[in-house]
């Protein structure tokens, strides 16, 4: 889920909440070991500064985590 409501004519607020499956990997010599499956998530906010019709500058902050 992502949102992008305008703050002004040239600035948009952006928020996102993402979630999905992930797995932990490790090595035992030459063998790859999958430890177990987790649920990963990303929560983020940002500002989009629209400098022209084709160019924007982004300022973002994200928190990425894993639920055990």
Image (cartoon, grey):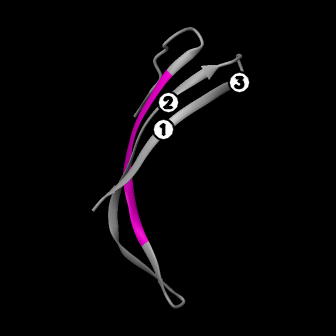
Query: In the picture provided, is 31 more to the left or to the right than 10?
Result: left
Q: Are marks 1 and 2 in contact (CB under 8 Å)?
A: yes
Residue 20: x percent and y percent? 38, 52
Query: In the picture provided, is 38 more to the left or to the right than 2?
Result: left
> What distance separates the C-alpha of mark 2 from that of mark 3?
16 Å
Height in image: 10 above or below 63?
above
Which residue is label 2 attached to? 46
> What distance separates the C-alpha of mark 1 from that of mark 2?
6 Å
Sequence-wise, the earlier of marks 1 and 2 is: 2
Which residue is label 3 attached to? 55
What residue is at 48 percent from the left and 38 percent from the top? 61
Q: Are marks 2 and 3 in contact (CB under 8 Å)?
A: no
Residue 47: x percent and y percent? 53, 25
Q: Quadrant of residue 22?
A: bottom left
> What distance separates the C-alpha of mark 1 from that of mark 3?
20 Å
Looking at the image, the residue that sits furthest to the left is 68
What residue is at 57 percent from the left and 24 percent from the top? 48
* Disc 3 crowd, CA 10 A, few/some/many (<14, 14-19, 20+): few
């Amino acid at each position: 889920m992502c949102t992008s409501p305008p703050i002004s004519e040239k600035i948009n607020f952006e928020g996102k909440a993402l979630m999905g499956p992930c797995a932990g990997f490790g090595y035992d010599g030459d063998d790859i070991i999958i430890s177990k499956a987790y649920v990963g998530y990303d929560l983020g906010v940002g500002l989009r500064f629209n400098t022209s019709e084709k160019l924007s500058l982004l300022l973002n902050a994200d928190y990425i985590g894993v639920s055990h």
